[in-house]
Image (spheres, grey):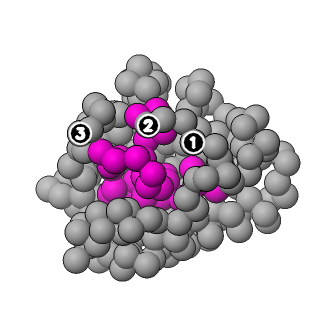
């Protein structure tokens, strides 16, 4: 994953300032948050291009919007601003959520952006639309959608397993039918600590 994030930065798909918070954590260690949205609102646009072929454009949009809404229980407003043709993971001062076919191999989703002095300035989210496991296990895609929105509001991977924000590679494999689709009590406690 570290090589994948570095490759994205070198290709200009992620700004260099995204690197520290997007690298995987060592087992049992939680990185500090890159920051929070000053007004507790994440304003985001959606780019429907390259959505998974097995979902209609409207289904893909609904799944993404539903994933964003999952985080509102911790006091963050997830404000959908409409559609855009801007691509996610470009440093363009716009929060864009969408699909990219050029993510590194084995990458299901990626969040990146800029922050300064504990304040988030931009957070884009990109999902890989062509992962065969997503079509085989739609619940896995739904979990990844929610997980990456957690990064968009400043959450990092926890040191524990079983949360929406858990980094799958750091824990024992779990069958997709057992994955959480909304923030767990652990996720909510960490989110509410960021947004008291």
> What is the x, y in percent for residue 193?
23, 69
Residue depicted at 29% across the width and 63% down the height: 190
Q: Which residue is mark 2?
A: 171
Q: Is residue 18 left or right of residue 3?
A: left
Q: Which residue is mark 3?
A: 29
C-beta proximity under 8 Å, tags 1 and 2:
yes
> What is the x, y in percent for residue 109?
55, 42
Residue depicted at 20% across the width and 49% down the height: 32
**Which residues are the magenta region?**
142-170
SS category of the residue bearing label 2: loop
The 10 Å Cα crowd at callout 2, few under 14, some 14 to 19, many 20 or more, is some
Indicate yes or no whether the magenta region holds residue 107: no
Answer with mark 3 or mark 2, whichever residue precedes in sequence.
3
In this rendered view, identify the residue nearer to me: 195 or 126.
195
Q: Quadrant of the C terminus?
A: bottom left
Q: Which mark is residue 174?
A: 1
Q: Which mark is residue 27?
A: none
Q: Quadrant of the N terminus?
A: top left
> What is the x, y in percent for residue 83?
65, 65
């Amino acid at each position: 994953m570290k090589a994948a994030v570095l490759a994205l930065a070198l290709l200009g798909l992620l700004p260099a300032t995204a690197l520290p918070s997007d690298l995987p954590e060592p087992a049992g260690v939680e990185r500090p948050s890159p920051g929070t949205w000053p007004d507790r609102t994440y304003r985001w646009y959606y780019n429907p291009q390259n959505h998974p072929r097995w979902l209609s454009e409207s289904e893909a949009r609904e799944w993404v919007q539903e994933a964003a809404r999952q985080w509102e229980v911790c006091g963050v407003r997830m404000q959908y601003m409409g559609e855009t043709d801007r691509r996610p993971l470009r440093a363009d001062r716009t929060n864009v959520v969408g699909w990219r076919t050029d993510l590194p191999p084995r990458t299901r989703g990626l969040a990146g952006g800029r922050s300064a002095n504990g304040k988030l300035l931009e957070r884009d989210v990109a999902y890989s639309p062509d992962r065969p496991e997503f079509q085989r296990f739609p619940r896995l895609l739904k979990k990844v959608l929610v997980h990456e929105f957690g990064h968009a509001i400043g959450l990092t991977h926890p040191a524990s397993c079983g949360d929406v924000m858990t980094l799958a590679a750091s824990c024992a494999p779990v069958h997709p039918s057992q994955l959480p689709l909304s923030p767990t009590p652990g996720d909510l406690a960490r989110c509410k600590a960021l947004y008291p």
